[in-house]
């Protein structure tokens, strides 16, 4: 019966294709531009990596890393029964942390769908004893609390035969067959249609896996080996929900049809991972940096690399200073609970944002080049200098492209002395201040640029 429903759904998707606008000709709708402006000001979001892989407690790449055979891995859903999952609690936690949106994995690289899909039986409704659509519950909770919901969607799939030709990953997984690439594209269209029609208005789609089909010499990406049909995929999204933002974690410049650009475990223009997006490929769309609280995306029982609250706050500040949101990840446990240590970190960040959120939300990249010791954000005629190193006593900025009216300590409102000249730049004296160990904020008021 499900196959018949899938064929009907697929037929409707294919029949609608002539209406879809080509990504090459893409002009954002007014609703999309409004959503981009909202996203640009959001500042902070929650990333959620959750799936049947959480049962094994070894991260979301466990199927690939352990080369688990398909027939063995397909036993996992029968053990997945997250009776502690509470969508309202998740959303409340995000709000208390100061987050404005949530991005959750609807389908990861293992191919398992965390929603009710008519396009496959390999989903949370048909293959688990839980038999509830967690995305449906989360969408309702987000709608109630005014949190926008984005869906992560994997382009690559280690389970399906029609994900063929194979990419660079999952090559050691036993039991993988061969199929037709066109069938896989049709499958993705059918699932994206479900995500865009069954869960109310969504914030957008967060694609991942493009890089699996790109040649890689260990230093840089090479030729793309398949046609992802982005004209059709992106066009389908913009047709069904014009306000929904499209992003793709491909580590490249912006492809026509995309509405925001993300950077994985890297600030925009940096390349600490070795496969980061080059600085000259940063687009003019809104930006987002994604990072983990510990060292893993999915639940990892042995991960002890938990970042301190100070480190996480610093990353949030630096992301804002680069003109980007921070999408901070949690990896819920198989029972549906977010790890207690993750909850603690999020609540502590939320406490910091209660006091200093105005220096993050609604700001743009500051005019001063970011340094390890201090960075800047800007909101209209106010520049916030975030001093991250408490040992700094003098801020020296060589290039000051603004006319200064006053400089204050954000907390005490105490005026600070400074010197400014065309030859030597700007010097701000911080010696009278009791420096904050996490972040001392200096408020620079400038002459209006309007």
Image (cartoon, rainbow, N blue to C red):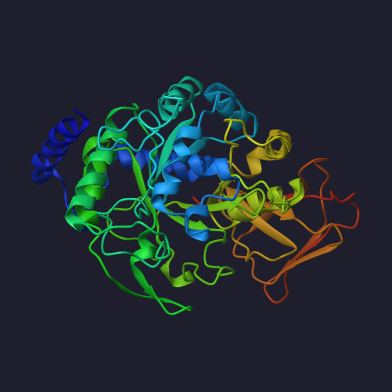
Q: Residue at x 74, y 37 (%)?
A: 348
Question: In terms of depth relative to the viewer, which is nearer, 340 or 176?
Answer: 176
Question: In terms of depth relative to the viewer, which is nearer, 359 or 102?
Answer: 102
Residue 419 visible in image: yes
Q: Residue at x 23, y 45 (%)?
A: 187
Residue 70 location in percent, x, y? 39, 51
Number of marks in the rendered image = 0
The image quadrant that residue 241 belongs to is top left
Q: Is residue 55 left or right of residue 76?
A: right
Residue 322 location in percent, x, y? 57, 58
Q: Residue 225, relative to residue 418: is it above or below?
A: below
Question: In terms of depth relative to the viewer, which is nearer, 432 or 333?
Answer: 333
Q: Residue 132, relative to residue 307: is it above or below?
A: above
The image quadrant that residue 428 belongs to is bottom right
Residue positioned most to the top? 144
Q: Residue at x 33, y 57 (%)?
A: 176
Q: Is residue 429 left or right of residue 197?
A: right
Residue 43 visible in image: no
Q: Residue at x 70, y 77 (%)?
A: 423
Name the quadrant of the N terminus. Answer: top left
Residue 93 location in percent, x, y? 62, 29
Residue 406 location in percent, x, y? 72, 51
Q: Residue 199, relative to residue 342: is it above or below?
A: above
């Amino acid at each position: 019966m499900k196959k018949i429903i899938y064929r009907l759904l697929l037929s409707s998707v294919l029949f609608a294709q002539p209406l879809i606008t080509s990504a090459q000709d893409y002009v954002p709708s007014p609703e999309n531009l409004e959503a981009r402006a909202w996203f640009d000001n959001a500042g902070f979001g929650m990333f959620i990596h959750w799936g049947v892989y959480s049962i094994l407690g070894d991260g979301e790449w466990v199927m690939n890393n352990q080369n688990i055979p398909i027939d063995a891995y397909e036993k996992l859903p029968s053990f997945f029964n997250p009776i502690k999952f509470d969508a309202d609690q998740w959303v409340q936690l995000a709000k208390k942390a100061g987050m404005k949106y949530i991005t959750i994995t609807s389908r990861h690289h293992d191919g398992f769908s965390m929603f009710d899909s008519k396009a496959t039986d390999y989903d949370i409704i048909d293959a688990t004893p839980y038999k509830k659509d967690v995305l449906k519950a989360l969408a309702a909770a987000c709608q109630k609390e005014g949190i926008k919901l984005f869906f992560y969607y994997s382009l690559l799939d280690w389970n399906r035969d029609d994900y063929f030709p194979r990419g660079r990953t999952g090559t050691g997984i036993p039991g993988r067959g061969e199929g037709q690439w066109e069938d896989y594209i049709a499958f993705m269209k059918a699932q994206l249609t479900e995500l865009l029609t069954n869960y109310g208005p969504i914030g957008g789609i967060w694609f991942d896996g493009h890089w699996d089909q790109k040649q890689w010499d260990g230093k840089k990406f090479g030729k793309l080996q398949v046609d992802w049909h982005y004209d059709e995929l992106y066009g389908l999204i913009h047709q069904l929900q014009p306000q929904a933002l499209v992003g793709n974690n491909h580590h490249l410049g912006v492809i026509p049809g995309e509405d925001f650009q993300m950077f994985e475990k890297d600030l925009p223009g940096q390349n600490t991972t070795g496969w980061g997006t080059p600085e000259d490929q940063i687009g003019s769309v809104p930006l987002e940096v994604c990072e983990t609280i510990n060292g893993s995306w999915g639940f990892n029982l042995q991960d002890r690399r938990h970042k301190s609250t100070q480190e996480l706050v610093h990353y949030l500040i630096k992301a804002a200073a680069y003109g980007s949101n921070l999408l901070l990840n949690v990896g819920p446990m198989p029972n549906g609970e977010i790890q207690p240590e993750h909850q603690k970190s999020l609540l502590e960040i939320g406490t910091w944002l209660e006091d200093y959120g105005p220096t993050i939300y609604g700001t743009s990249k500051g005019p001063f080049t970011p340094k390890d010791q201090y960075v800047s954000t800007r909101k209209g005629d106010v520049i916030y200098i975030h001093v991250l190193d408490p040992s700094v006593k003098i801020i020296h900025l060589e290039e000051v492209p603004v006319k200064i009216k006053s400089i204050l300590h954000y907390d005490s409102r105490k005026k600070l002395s400074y010197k400014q000249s065309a030859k030597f730049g700007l010097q701000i004296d911080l010696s009278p201040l009791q420096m904050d160990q996490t972040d001392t904020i200096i408020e620079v008021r400038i002459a209006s640029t309007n």
